[in-house]
Image (cartoon, coloured by chain):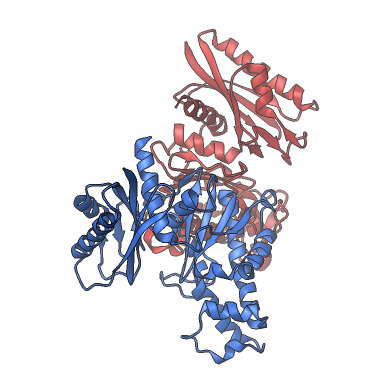
Chain colours: A red, B blue
Amino acid sequence: MAEVVAGIDIGGTNTVIGIVNRNGDILAESTLPTRCNATFDVFVKNLTGAIEQLLMELGHEHRLLGVGVGSPNGSYNLGAIVDAPNLEWKGILPLCKEITLLTGVPSVVTNDANAAALGELLFGAAKGMKNFVVITLGTGLGSGIVVDGKLVIGHDGFAGEFGHVVAKANGRQCGCGKKGCLETYASATGLRRTAFKMIADSNQPSMLRNVTYDKLTAKMITEAAKTGDPLARAAFEYTGLILGTRLADLVAILNPEAIFFFGGLANAGELLIDPVRRYMEEYMFPVFKGKVKLLLSGLQDKNAAVLGAAALIWEELDKSAR
Amino acid sequence: MAEVVAGIDIGGTNTVIGIVNRNGDILAESTLPTRCNATFDVFVKNLTGAIEQLLMELGHEHRLLGVGVGSPNGSYNLGAIVDAPNLEWKGILPLCKEITLLTGVPSVVTNDANAAALGELLFGAAKGMKNFVVITLGTGLGSGIVVDGKLVIGHDGFAGEFGHVVAKANGRQCGCGKKGCLETYASATGLRRTAFKMIADSNQPSMLRNVTYDKLTAKMITEAAKTGDPLARAAFEYTGLILGTRLADLVAILNPEAIFFFGGLANAGELLIDPVRRYMEEYMFPVFKGKVKLLLSGLQDKNAAVLGAAALIWEELDKSAR
C-alpha cells in the first residue's frame, strides 16, 4: 500500500490537484475551474470529487493520508481562506474543515509563498537547510520563511508579508492600500512600472518605447535586457537596488543560509540576481557579508505550487507523528 | 537539593554573576571587573571562582546544573565571544568550553538582546507567548526574536541584528561601518543625535540649547520632554517615526503577538511608545492593524541581563532533557 497525499493549488482562475508521494513525485494530476459560478460548498465537493477520481485512476494500492492546500490568503491557524481578493467567495471560508468532513483525512492550508518554502525544503534545493527564505516574484512579492527547519507562521498565521515592507516612503500605490511597498518595485508588475517610469523620465533609446503599459510584460523587459537594451537593463538595476537593500535588512533580522527566488520574474536569472547580490552585499551588516547564497528555486521547472501544498501536509503528518 | 544555574552578564566594564533558581529568583549575586588587565584564561578562572564562592555561601543544598552567559557578540553556535569591540581580548574566545572544563557543567552563550528575550519568556511579561520580539534600547538597538516559543538563532548564530536594518539611505554613520542603520536613530545615542540636529536645524526654544553634545544624555532629553520642552518632544516624535515605520516592517515579516521595549531609553515609557505606536499603525499592513501589543519589559526593574542568561541555560537544559 503506497501512502500519498493530495497537493492542491488554488488560483484565481484554476485549481490544480496532484497526488504526491513521499519523494515528491506527482503520480496523477487534474485541473478544476476555481471561477465556477457555484457556492463555496459546491466547489469543495468538486475538489474532493476530483481527488477521489485521481485515486481511483491510480488504483486501490494508494492510500490518501491528508490534503494540503496552497491558496491566496490561506490562514494556517484558522484552516481557512480569509477575504481573498481574487476569489468569488468572500469572508472566512472554512476550507480544511469541509475537506476533512468529505475525505475523512486531515487537511491544512497556507498561502502560496509558505507552501513554496516547504516545497523547497522537502523536495527542492533547500533540502537539509535549517534557515532560509523563499521569495516568490510574480504579480506581487511573497515570502516563505523557514527558521530552524520550520515554517514561520506567526501569531495570526500571516507571517511572511515581506512584499509589504516599506521600500520607499510615500512611494508607489500598492494594492494593499499602503504606499511604497516592496512588491510595487520588486515583482513582475513592479519591473513594468519601473520600465514605464524610466521611459518617461529618461531619453534613453529603447525598443520598449513602442509598447503600451497594458501590453508590457516582465518577460518583454527581460528579453529586451538580454539584447542589451539600455533602458531595460537600467530597470533591472533599479529593481536590484530596491530588492537588494531590503534583503540586506532581512538577513540582519533572520541570518538565513540562503535566499531562493521563484516565480515568473525569477526566470530572468542573473539579469535580476546579479544587481540584487551587488546591492545586498553593499548594504549588508559586516558579519554577514559574502555569506548568504542567492539561488534559483530547485522547483522552478516543476509544478511547485502542488509540490509545496503536498509538502505542507507531509510536514503536518510528521509533526502529529512526533 | 535545590537545582540552580549561574546567569552571567558580561559588560564592557563589569561582569555580574547571579545564582538563579527555576522560578527566576536571584539567590545570590556578585560582581567582577571585566577590564582586569589579565588574559582571557585568567578572567574565566576568576569567573568560575566567583560562581563557586556564591554556591559556597548559599550552602551545600544547592546543585549547579549549568552556566548561561549574555555577552556582546556572543555566538550561540560557536559557544564563543567573537571580536567584541568593547572587550580587551580579541578574536574568537571559546568561553563555553573553558567554563565547562572548569565547572563540569554545560555552558551556553548568546548576545545581550537574545538573553533579554529568553528572560522575558521564562521570567517576564512574555510568559505563555509563542511569537514576540524584545527590542533593547541602550547605547545601540538590539533585538531578540522568539518564533513558535524558541529563540531565533540563525544560520551563523547572529540573527536579531534589527539595529542594523537601513532606516535612511546614506543616513547617519553607524559604528558598524554602514550608514543610516536603525540604531543611529532609535537608541539613547540616536535620540541624542536627533536632539542635537534639531537644535541646529530649528529655532525652537529649548532648555537643551545650554548642554554640550558630550554631556547630553537620553535621560536629560526625557526629563525635558516631560516638562513640555517642544524640541525634546519633537526629538521623541522623530524617533517614533523612524522606529515605528521599521517595526511595521518587522511585523509584516514575523507577525508577532507583542513587541517589548527594554533598556535605558525604554524608561521614557509612553513618551516613546506613543509616537512609535502611531507611526507603526500608520505604516502597518492592513491585516495586522491594531493587533500587535507594544509593551514595556516585565524585567525592566530587575537584573534582566542576569535573568536572561539564566533563562538561556534553563532553556538549553530543558532542550537536552526533551
Near-viewer residue (A107 or B171): A107
- Residue A310 in the image: above or below residue B219: above
Near-viewer residue (B305 or A117): B305
**In-image side of A97 versus B25 (left or right):** right
Q: Where is residue A135 in the image (x, y as percent from the top left)?
A: 53, 46
Q: Report the quarter where the C terminus of chain A lies.
A: top left
**In-image side of A133 versus B76 (left or right):** right
Near-viewer residue (B8 or A143): B8
- Residue B211 in the image: above or below residue B106: below
Residue shown at the point (63%, 88%) measured from the top left: B206
Residue shown at the point (59%, 57%) measured from the top left: B249
- Whether residue B214 can be seen here: yes
Residue shown at the point (58%, 61%) measured from the top left: B246
Q: Position of residue A154 (x, y in %)?
A: 57, 44
Quadrant position of residue B242: bottom right
Q: Where is residue A197 in the image (x, y as percent from the top left)?
A: 67, 62
**In-image side of A235 versus B89 (left or right):** right
Residue shown at the point (71%, 33%) measured from the top left: A13
Residue with the most extreme top position: A60
Q: Where is residue A42 in the image (x, y as percent from the top left)?
A: 76, 22
Count of numbered marks = 0
- Whether residue B85 can be seen here: no
